[in-house]
Amino acid sequence: MATQSTSQALLRAGGLRSHRWHYRLRHVRRALLYAALIGGALFFLFPLAWMVGTSLKTIEEVGRSQLTLMPKTPQWQNYEKLLNDSTFYRSYLNSVFIVTLVLLGTVTSVSFVAFSFSRLEWKGRGIVFALMMSTLMLPYQATLVPQYVMFHKLHWIRTFNPITIPGFFAGGAALVFLLRQFMLTIPKELDEAAMIDGANPLQIWWYVIMPLSRPAVATITVFLFVGQWNNLLMPLIYLQKPALYTMPIYVAQKLNLQESPLPWQDVMAASVLFVIPVLVVFLFTQRYFIEGISTTGGKG
């Protein structure tokens, strides 16, 4: 009996030590995970901090060989000089105008096409979808010259039309595919119930499918906003008029000034104000954005 009691006591002691060991190991793993996440966040935030710090430096501090993240005395006049520039306001408003039209037209048209591919039955749907997806293999550079020729014949050069109007025709097969895959996960019984209640396809799209597709819509909205807000090539090719220039061209022009040394503090100040809308859009849509990315499956 004494031997059995001793064995049981040893087993309990061993189990207790094992429990403590696993408890400590779990806390160590959690601490290492938090340290890795914090380190990664600091790594990705460093360029943003560097941009903000440089925007507040003097031109002498920018040109020094030693690296300093923040200036000794913040030069808020860098932003004041920028905000007193009428060209800055015009470029900012041009970017806002273009992005608003592109978002409105593209999100609406892409949702229509995705709804057609995912919820409606029509002859040749699979073939048309395959043809649309095949356009993803076509390099953008291959269509650049034909597009320019077409827009030139339409007398659209030096206008916003080449950038804003194509969005109303569901440009972007990848966006259509993403939204279609999400819509396929919505039960078809909802469409049937709405049709029994007398709803037509347009009403089903607006009142049933679009509210349920909010995460996917937020995802393509973020993609479109970031892509169009940072778009330099198309405005540079088609606008060709200082009054129509957007913010990417405005920032790029500051790097082309015949100054020595280059006014990096002004460039960074313009870049800080330029990136603020992107951060605001992502902060307001991150919940839907992450949900849309995680729930868009491969059903087809």
Image (cartoon, helix red, strand yellow):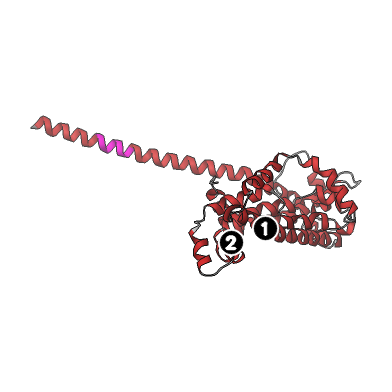
| Residue labelled with disc 1 | 107
Residue 228 location (% of width, % of height): 74, 53
State which tag comes first along the sequence, 2 or 1.
1
Give the residue type that dot 1 points to: Val
| Dot 2 alpha-carbon crowd within 10 angstroms: few under 14, some 14 to 19, many 20 or more | some
Residue located at (39% from left, 40% from top)? 26
Q: In this rendering, is residue 192 above or below 136?
A: below
Residue 198 location (% of width, % of height): 54, 70
Residues rendered magenta in the picture: 14-20
Query: Which corner quadrant holds the N terminus?
Result: top left
Residue 129 left/right relative to 243: left
Examine the rendering and report whether any part of residue 271 can be seen.
Answer: yes
Q: Nearer the viewer, residue 2 or 221?
A: 221
Asked where in the image residue 16 lies, by quadrant, the reply is top left
Secondary structure of residue under mark 2: helix
| Residue labelled with disc 2 | 210
